[in-house]
Amino acid sequence: MKTTILVIGIVKNRDRVLLRKKPDGSPPYKETWYLFGGELNTDNQNPDEVLISTLKKQTGVDIKTTERLGWDTETKPDHDGNMTFYIYLDYLCEYVSGNLVPAEGIEKLEWVPIEQLSSYDLVPPSRKLFKKIGYL
């Protein structure tokens, strides 16, 4: 089984968090809302830098990491259907500047008030992280 390490960020802008919507037909959780993250590909990568760079590419906004929230794991099929063991390194981030511009493959970007998160169809790992920090 393959192992993938992902750096995941909750991006806050005052009382809102940034979410993206998966397009129809995007496995394994179709048409759901989720957080942002990037894959650590080498031993020399800095997780903070990977997250900052990935968020810029995916959303057009600049962020800074403010807190390491810990880690979590999940086993699920990857985009090709191969079972993969995922390790999530979770961060709290702060919006710095920029306008939202969704990258290819992102249906929609939205600043969601924290008190409205429960009304969104969130992927299980994002829902679990929001519960862990008391947002749900």
Image (cartoon, rainbow, N blue to C red):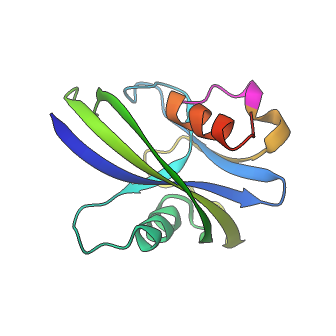
Residue 52's x, y, as percent?
A: 50, 70
Residue 64 position by quadrant: bottom right
In this rendering, does residue 99 appear at all? no
Q: On screen, 81 above or below 47?
A: above
Identified at 70% across, 28% down, the residue is 120
Between 36 and 44, the residue placed more toward the observer is: 44
Q: Residue reaching furthest left? A: 1
In this rendering, does residue 53 appear at all? yes
Identified at 53% across, 26% down, the residue is 31
Q: On screen, 19 above or below 61?
A: above
Question: In the picture, which quadrant includes the N terminus?
Answer: top left
Question: In the picture, which quadrant includes the C terminus?
Answer: top right
Identified at 33% across, 40% down, the residue is 86
Q: Which residues are magenta?
A: 118-123
User: In the displayed structure, does residue 24 sit left or right of residue 119?
Assistant: left
User: Can residue 67 be found in the magenta stretch?
Assistant: no
Residue 32's x, y, as percent?
A: 55, 29
User: In the displayed structure, does residue 72 sit left or right of residue 14?
Assistant: left
